[in-house]
Amino acid sequence: MPETRPRPVRMTCLLVTATAVAASLIAVGSAQAVTGPEATPGQYAYAAKLSIGDEANSRACSATLVNARWVLTAAACLAAKPGDAIAAGRPALATTATFAGGQTRQVVEVSASAADRDLVLARLAAPVTDIAPVQRATTAPATGADLTATGFGRTKTEWVPGKLHTGTFTANTTDATTLAITGKGTDVLCKGDTGGPLLNAAGELVGINSRSWQGGCLGETETRTGAVSARTDNIGQWIDQVIAPRNSSQVSLLAGGGGAMWKQTGDLAYGEYGQSWAKADGLDVSRVSTVRHGDEIRAYAIAGGRVYSQDFYNGTGKWSGWGEVPGGAAGAKDITASLVGDTVHVLIVGSEGNLYAQAADYRAGRWNDLWTAVGATGLSHITSAVSGTTVRVVGVAGGEVYNRDFDTRSGSWSAWGAVPGGAGGAVDIASSAIGNNVHVQIIGADGAIWTQYGNYDAGRWNDKWTKAGGTGLTRITSAASGDSVELYAVGADGKINNATMRAADGVWGAFHELSGGLAGASDIAVAVSAAPSKVTLAAGTANTMFAQSGTLATGTFGAQWNSVGGAPITALTSVDTGTGIRYIGVAGGKVYDRVYDPRTNAWADWYDVPGGAAGVKDVSAAMINNVLYVQIIGSDGKLYTQVGDYNAGRWNDGWTLVTGVDGLTGITSVKAGQFVRLYGLAGGKAYGRDLDTRKGTWSVWGEIPGSIAGAKDISAARVGHTVQVQVIGSDGALYNQSADYLAGAWKPTWSRIGGSRLNRIASTSAANNVHVYATGTDGRVRNTTLDTTAGNWTGWREIPGALTSPTDLTVTTAR
């Protein structure tokens, strides 16, 4: 009697092969699934059909959404040739994922295939946020258990059935990497079902369809219905590592066109941009330049030959409104801006082709009185980039390219010098600095991008300009992001295109058009915000204070918590000062502060915060423009505040009572532009209010919607104009709420994130992610992360080391 378990060496991979008939049929419409019944509408919505290759060389597979950005499928599906290993990077063949509801996404990236089984992860061009990913099992099914498979392959009667089908299978045997299954009745896996999900009775993913005998499938003579699936229950760590939220730079674009200004944002780690350009205002600009200054974008533009500026506050999502730059410039032709410290240096080409300079000191809150002529003749275009305290200026005159430097410390300019290579006919220019080196790009007379490189460490330029690509371009801008240069160009049709250069080898990627449908752009400016790369945790205990440091990109931390000395802390918070971390703690009911310098790993002593506070129960703080706003809960359960102005070097004389909700038990705060957003607990409920630091006025307390009750601790973190608030519920689990302050709306309910026996929490943001850290009753600290774009929370991960009876926890990120 033949062996009932299928022999893998003789099994058929379910990929659609390139036979003349099968390939042409599968390429038409949706290649569907298992020979069992059709799935009901909305059932298994996380299942997707993969269309792979072009019309001449196509195949189809199935896949499963495991994260808003990622689908899991069989490696054989996405290999250049079935059976080949897959290297991480772009897919070997063009691939589109189509979900049962009709949504489509291009696959833009693949992981390396799993080392020991037929699995690979594929990233989608944009998140799928309205379909819940599949839940993953953590144990293998028992022998004899009923399982459900779904897929988009052929059936018994149709080559291309057009709908998702399901089948019921029995679990036979399990080894370390595979599950052997057999179809019940006449159910079987057919070609096109490879990569589809195998689910247990709870609807959890236990495997990915890999190989089958295909007994009874259309076009097959085999009768056996056995199949093999790659196990997923014991490879969760690999999946989680690949799909973990990325910590990357964020890009803000500002374009003029159609008599208005338009804004767009992007995430450089994923190459994702908004689906549309948002109208910023109605100023009809001819040229624009931007810089990123902390949490704000500062924009400078030419309209009607005059120069204007305005600021965008990420914390509120609002613009300040245009104001004319002092000095009465007229007839300006081009503009560039560079930030050094808290001062923005703005340069323009005047009506006669001369170079003029202005500067705004944002810490002092003032511009220079006049524009200063700094020499040059015949200029048509300029750009600038910063290396340390030097502004490196590059300009176009008569189609040729010249450069000079401005030393901001001495206020002196170097002489103009010709950039080697004989550019000739340059029609626009952009530049970016990485370290002490400058990457210059021009649009040549042929409408393409040409590049040059100034190595200031070695004191030389390249010998010639190098063509990078593009065609019909009219305007360009660029910005450095880590070790890459991001270039944005306006085409002849007024649409915006992007290309990326790796600084290490000077290789440019292909140009691609940004989504959003903007056309008729007159100019484009870019500002990049580098994401924090480091995270520092600090915890108070009954005896002293402890700290741990980690890397956000990898999630790695030190092996243990380190004692950093000081008083026994009962409540603790922290703020990033730009050069270090300032801690504010409560010890013996009094309030103290100390500074940590991560550059030298030096901890200062605790100093008493003036004002004589006593019996303090909790503390929070936010720093805005080097002014520290501290809030405490007094012994009476009421809110009090203090302000430390580090620009002036002084604190207020005393603590100020802020009336409102009494009986407070916990508080937390975040900065948002010029506002401090404060959240507190009283009677187990959560409340919020704002401080307008410009006016010194507080809004009234308002209960956060969703009716949380019995909350024990509270934290908050801001991403853009949205604040994510977390509490520990009465059941010891983590809950989350979010408020979009631009839209003026909270979500209707709190979401239960999970965890158990939590007692203190702290959170922080980095890029578009919110990182939450929590202490448990066992003294260990755990972390979960929210990708706010995709809406996904990661599983809990334990931070190395244990604390003895931690009293509070705080977290700070830094670049």
Image: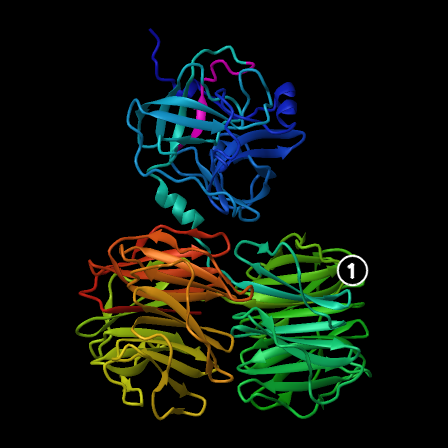
Residue 55 horizontal/vertical position (percent): 67, 31
Q: Secondary structure at mark 1?
A: loop
Q: Residue at x 34, y 87 (%)?
A: 655
Rendering quarter of residue 652: bottom left
Q: Residue at x 43, y 39 (%)?
A: 134
Question: Which colouring convention does the figure follow?
Answer: rainbow
**Image quadrant containing the C terminus:** bottom left
Q: Tell me the magenta residue range.
A: 207-219
Residue 314 horizontal/vertical position (percent): 54, 70
- Which residue is more in the foreground, 667 or 425? 667
Say if 109 sits above or below 159 in the image: below
Say if 732 sits above or below 358 in the image: above
Q: Which residue type does callout 1 highlight?
A: Gly
- Which residue is more in the foreground, 781 or 661? 661
Is 290 a magenta residue?
Answer: no
In this rendering, position of residue 589 left or right of residue 327: left
Say if 76 sits above or below 443 in the image: above
Is 211 a magenta residue?
Answer: yes
- The answer to whether one can see residue 762 in this image is no
Look at mark 1 in the image and give the residue it sits on: 447
Say if 439 sits above or below 792 in the image: below
The crowd level at tag 1 (other Cα within 10 Å; few <14, some 14-19, many 20+) is many
